[in-house]
Image: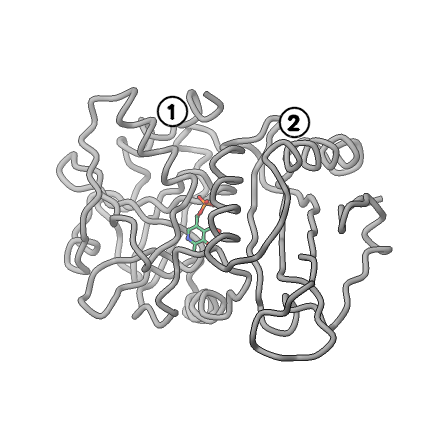
Amino acid sequence: MNTVFLNGQFMAASEAKISPMDRGFLFGDGIYEVIPSYHGRFVGFAPHIARLHSGLKELNIQHSMTEADWTDISNQLLALNRPAMGDNLAVYIQVSRGTDSKRYHAFPTGVNPTIFAYTFVIGKEPMADKSQAVTFNVVTGNDLRWQRCHIKSTSLLGNVLHYQQGVEQGAQEILLFDREGNLTEGAAVNVFVVKNGEIATPPLSNKLLPGITRLLLLRILRQHSPLNVVEREISYAEVVAADEIWITSSSKEIAPVLQVNGKPVGDGKVGDIWLKAQQLFSTHKYD
Ligand code: PLP
């Protein structure tokens, strides 16, 4: 049985009910997080919760949850679900503005947020092994999303449409470029580009999500390696001429991209710098 958390209670997933008047349903008015865990240990728990709280603050969704409350709920969900679901689980958290009596755009008063969390199975823990790397072929497109992509909003239609655009072209992700022709991110990932030993990723702004894997990877590479890591604008020309491209997310960690628009990245194989980066990430991600 899959046990979920809804508004203060643990229950069977089949028992969890939310009103159709919930603003999460009507407006996509909410924030979410996905926190990976392997064998009961979370990766990046504190920064995930910090991002959740900063998104809620940005949307002015009032709540009284603390990091300790989230830790408690998340640990209980793992304890309840690991026996049936296995050891590689992500905890999904969603907080919507709550259920109003009418559909009206302005923020309602006197409404409690709807708090939902559940676990789902993720792939096995990524390994620093070229032969076992889960690799991706991607296409490219113009970033047509809104100008608040730094908010991890449940209003994901922009991302969904871009992801689908990639799938319809036979790819597993799509790399997006802003009006100036600079790389922003993928539909559900951040992006790193390697050229002549330099590891670059776009700087944080309203154009991309501040990914926790991105944050941990930058921190780990800077603390534990002599590798040259920079946050700077990256043009389309640089992307297609890269030696290596990686996409990062909580469930993928660092995944090598082998093709962009049907053309090989570098020599078309999993790169040596990826191997080093994933080794360092695997070693230090729980620090
Ligand atoms: N960018 C977008 C648009 C995402 O949806 C995600 C993850 O869901 C990421 C980047 C990667 O973020 P994280 O490393 O926190 O999973």
Which is more foreground, mark 2 or mark 1? 2
Q: In this view, does 105 lie above or below 41?
A: below
Position above or below: 76 against 110 = above
Mark 1: which secondary structure? helix
Closest to the observer: 81 or 174? 81
Q: Residue 152 carries which label?
A: none
What is the spatial separation of the Cα atoms under label 2 and label 1, in whole angstroms?
21 Å
Which residue: 49% across, 33% down?
Answer: 44
Q: Provide residue 63's location: percent of width, then percent of height.
A: 62, 49
Q: Mark 1 points at which residue?
A: 279
Task: Return the x and y of residue 45 as percentages of the image width and height.
Answer: 54, 33
Colour mapping: one colour
- Give residue 137's quadrant in the image: bottom left
Q: In which quarter of the image is the N terminus?
A: top right
59 to the left or right of 197: right
Residue 148, image x and y in percent?
Answer: 38, 63
Which residue in the structure is indicated by mark 2?
Answer: 40
Image check: 33 left or right of 187?
Answer: right
Q: Is mark 2 on a helix, strand or loop?
A: loop
Say if disc 2 is inside 8 Å of ligand 1. no
* Residue 135 picture quarter: top left
Task: State whether residue 158 is above or below residue 152.
Answer: below
Query: Viewer-proximal residue, 133 or 40?
Result: 40
134 relative position to 29: left or right: left
